[in-house]
């Protein structure tokens, strides 16, 4: 009697028609292949479906009649988030890393499953660890997870944060094989929903970049490469001045990552004289924002003279944004002055808004002594507590409309190359936006340093995964935004159904974003209908 036989070869499945018979000499049952129907793919599945429908009609039934009889949906699950997180963690070799932690610490639970779920939730809809526990049933591909192990897992992440950063760095790319490369550095703050400080703890009050005056916070310094791939990060107490973090970042770059030659790109708020000296002492080069207004008048007057701005550089071709520039030498570094009309208009509008605000403050009864400097006001002579517009300060500020200065000691780069590199500094700012908005790193609700470190490490891993996905898709010429990636992952669903006494999984129809994501990441496609016993061959 003939029957279908399904066998696996490598990662693929093949279907053949075989016939069972009894050997006339030995009397033993045997089978022989009658027809090879080929590899199971979308094309053959379509042929099988047509064959099945014809056989059903031959038997006097239709597919619709079979489906109507005893078909019941048992549940619906997302497989995309877990699948993709596992895939990227494996590319970082972090699956093996976490399994080593389990063996070394003789853990009685699968640490990787907890990390995968927390990352999936962070990418999907950031929630508390308690919510992670409750929402675990929405995903397919994980075992049963216990609540107390989520918090223990955070502690293992905190204790392994340095090793995790290095593992991601080493496995995701061989960044500095070249004789020269560029890294970008910036600092941000993450606030807590609390005003309570604890001595010597990470949570302290300080200057908030989120405008959360009075809330406790932590400070984070981040190094990334030109592709937005993270290199490493460091957490500091919330009252740490951002410039003070820079030398730590340099030491980490030198010692832990053994990078000898690099150009560091950073904003002007980061670059004190001692920080620039530290860059040079480490053998690095720099491209940094220069404080134009504090330069000597002889240098400054040249850099704000538009007659000297004879060269043009296209900053943004899409918006036709042209920047004019000139350059000069000062104290062993090249200073490039840039000017654009768009920036000049922006500076003018911001100044006029402050002047208008200052005029309103003068008419009010509030104490403006601490705000006067910001709104172009000065104290009246011989009239204590009274203020008036500072016309000289307004006139001086107007001189700098549209100008921005950049300093570098990278002599082998052209001016345009230097401007191109400094332009990419916005990538760090975009990275922090991803941390704060898409991944919702703040506000934080963990109170001890270990849990805080674990939470930030988790968000750093989620950001690394998101960035790696975007890079891979861009390499395939099919880029997707963060929100479209989330939309694609949302649509990757399976319905568990019961039919004729057996359970199957039915895949949701594939949207365009899903096809782009699965093809770009080389994810094995799931057939429209899979028997429950075979689903783990795909997820």
Image: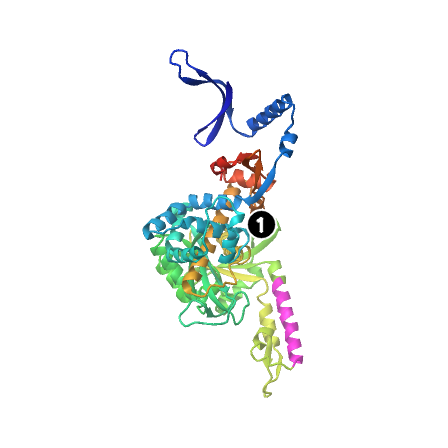
Query: Residue 391's quadrant in the figure?
Result: bottom right
Q: Is residue 238 magenta?
A: no
Considering only vertical position in the picture, is 70 above or below 352? Answer: above
- Number of numbered markers: 1
Judge from the rendering whether residue 201 lies leftward or rightward of residue 349; answer left or right. left
Say which of 537 and 531 sits in front. Answer: 531
Say which of 140 and 300 sits in front. Answer: 140
Segment tinted magenta in the rendering = 346-364
Kindly tell me whether residue 313 is visible in this rendering. Answer: yes
- How many C-alpha atoms fall within 10 Å of the one at disc 1: few (<14), some, or many (≥20)? few
Q: Does the magenta stretch include residue 362?
A: yes
Name the residue: 54% across, 68% down. Answer: 212
By secondary structure, the bulk of the magenta-drawn segment is best described as: helix
Considering only vertical position in the picture, is 192 above or below 388? Answer: above
Tell me residue 387's x, y (percent).
Answer: 61, 82
**Residue at the limit of the structure toward the bottom, as seen here:** 382
Tell me residue 8's x, y (percent).
Answer: 45, 29
Say which of 268 and 300 sits in front. Answer: 268
**Residue at the limit of the structure toward the left, as seen here:** 104
Considering only vertical position in the picture, is 381 above or below 45? Answer: below
Kindly tell me whether residue 228 is visible in this rendering. Answer: no
Say which of 178 and 35 sits in front. Answer: 35
Helix, strand or loop for disc 1: helix
Q: Which colour scheme is used?
A: rainbow
Tell me residue 73's x, y (percent).
Answer: 59, 41
Tell me residue 184's x, y (percent).
Answer: 46, 55
**Mark 1 lies on residue:** 483
Name the residue: 63% across, 33% down. Answer: 69
């Amino acid at each position: 009697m003939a029957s279908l036989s399904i066998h696996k070869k490598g990662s693929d499945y093949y279907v053949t028609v075989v016939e069972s018979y009894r050997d006339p000499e030995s009397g033993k049952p045997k089978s022989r292949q009658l027809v090879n129907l080929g590899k199971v793919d979308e094309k053959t599945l379509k042929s099988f479906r047509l064959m099945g429908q014809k056989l059903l009609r031959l038997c006097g039934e239709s597919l619709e009649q079979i489906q109507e009889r005893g078909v019941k949906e048992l549940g619906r699950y997302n497989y995309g988030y877990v699948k993709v997180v596992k895939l990227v963690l494996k590319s970082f070799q972090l699956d093996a890393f976490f399994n080593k932690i389990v063996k070394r610490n003789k853990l009685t639970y699968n640490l990787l499953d907890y990390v995968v779920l927390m990352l999936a939730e962070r990418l999907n809809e950031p929630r508390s660890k308690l919510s992670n526990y409750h929402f675990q049933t929405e995903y397919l591909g994980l075992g049963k997870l216990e609540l107390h192990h989520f918090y223990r897992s955070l502690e293992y992440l905190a204790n392994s944060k340095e090793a995790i950063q290095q593992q991601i760095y080493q496995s995701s790319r061989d960044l500095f094989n070249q004789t020269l490369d560029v890294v970008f550095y910036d600092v941000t703050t993450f606030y807590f929903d609390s005003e309570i400080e604890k001595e010597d703890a990470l949570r302290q009050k300080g200057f908030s970049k989120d405008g959360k005056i009075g809330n406790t916070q932590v400070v984070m310094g981040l190094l990334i490469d030109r592709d937005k791939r993270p290199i490493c990060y460091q957490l500091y107490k919330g009252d740490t001045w951002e410039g003070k973090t820079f030398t730590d970042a340099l030491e980490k770059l030198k010692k832990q990552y053994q990078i000898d030659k690099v150009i560091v790109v950073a904003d002007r708020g980061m670059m004190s004289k001692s920080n620039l000296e530290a860059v040079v002492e480490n053998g690095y080069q720099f491209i940094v924002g220069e404080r134009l207004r504090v330069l000597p008048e002889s240098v400054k007057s040249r850099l704000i003279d538009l007659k000297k701005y004879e060269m043009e550089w296209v900053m943004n071709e899409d918006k036709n944004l042209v920047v004019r520039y000139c350059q000069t030498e000062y104290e062993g570094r090249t200073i490039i002055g840039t000017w654009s009309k768009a920036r000049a208009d922006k500076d003018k509008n911001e100044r006029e808004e402050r002047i208008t605000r200052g005029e309103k403050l003068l008419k009010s009864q509030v104490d403006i002594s601490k705000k006067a400097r910001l709104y172009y006001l000065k104290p009246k002579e011989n009239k204590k507590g009274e203020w008036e517009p500072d016309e000289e300060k307004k006139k001086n500020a107007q001189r700098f409309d549209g100008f921005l200065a950049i300093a570098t000691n990278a002599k082998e780069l052209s001016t345009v190359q230097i401007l191109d590199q400094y332009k990419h500094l916005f990538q760090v700012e975009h990275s922090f936006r991803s941390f704060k908005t898409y991944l919702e790193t703040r506000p934080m609700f963990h109170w001890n340093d270990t849990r805080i470190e674990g939470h930030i490490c988790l968000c750093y891993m989620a950001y690394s995964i998101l960035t790696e996905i975007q890079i891979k898709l861009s390499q395939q010429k099919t880029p997707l935004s963060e929100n479209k990636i989330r939309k694609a992952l949302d649509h990757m669903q399976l319905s568990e159904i019961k039919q004729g006494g057996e359970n199957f999984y039915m895949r949701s129809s594939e949207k365009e974003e899903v096809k782009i994501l699965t093809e770009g990441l080389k994810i094995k496609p799931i057939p429209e209908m899979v028997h429950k016993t075979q689903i783990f061959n795909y997820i």
